[in-house]
Amino acid sequence: MTARLLPSAVLILEDEAMHALVMRRMLAELAPELPVEVLADPRHAAAGVLDSPVGALVVTDRLLDGYDSLELVAAALARRSDLALAVLSAAISDLDRARAIEAGAFEAAEKPGSLDGWRALLGRLLDLGVERPRQV
């Protein structure tokens, strides 16, 4: 059996403690060897993204404490094309999804309402984040 290819690490940008906890626990279940960091303060988000290991997956809340994370996505990818970024939101419109993809995110999705939903979404993000073409 072939080993699953994973990102080098995961950075979660999430200001809701329960969502961050659920994501961290689901990632520990899906890929226990994967380093996971959580940042809740948007003032530290840009530095956290730029300091991420090469090939990391960054999962960001659409709004971090009122801050529009799409600006962060675009700025981070302008400097770190090796990163895979995904945007999550409690409710995401077609316009917001299109804006996230235009900013460089490989995925923009609604946050699930169940643990099974989180497991499925994060598993998909791990797979897609690795498949996404990168420039290193």
Image: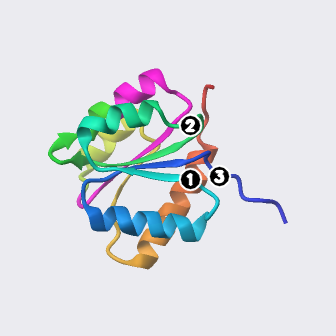
| Residue 64 x, y percent position in the rendering | 23, 47
The residue carrying mark 2 is 53
**Is residue 54 highlighted in magenta?**
no
Look at the numbered discs 3 and 2 and tell me whether their residues touch, using CB distance below 8 Å: no
Residue 35 image label = 1
Inter-mark Cα distance, 2 to 1 = 10 Å
Nearest to N terminus: mark 1 or mark 3: 3
Indicate the amino acid at tag 1. Answer: Pro
Q: Hey, which residue is sitting farthest right in the picture?
A: 1
The residue carrying mark 3 is 6
Q: Is residue 44 visible?
A: yes
Please state if 99 lies on the left or on the right of 76 as rendered.
left
Look at the numbered discs 2 and 1 and tell me whether their residues touch, using CB distance below 8 Å: yes
Q: Which residues are the magenta region?
A: 73-91
Q: Quadrant of residue 123?
A: bottom right
Nearest to N terminus: mark 2 or mark 1: 1
**Residue at position x 31%, y 33% from top?**
72
Residue nearest the observer in this picture, 20 or 98: 20
Indicate the amino acid at tag 2. Answer: Pro
Disc 2 residue crowd, few under 14, some 14–19, many 20+, Cα 10 Å: some
Indicate the amino acid at tag 3. Answer: Leu
| Residue 21 x, y percent position in the rendering | 37, 66
**Is residue 79 highlighted in magenta?**
yes
Residue nearest the observer in this picture, 20 or 2: 20
**Coloration mode:** rainbow
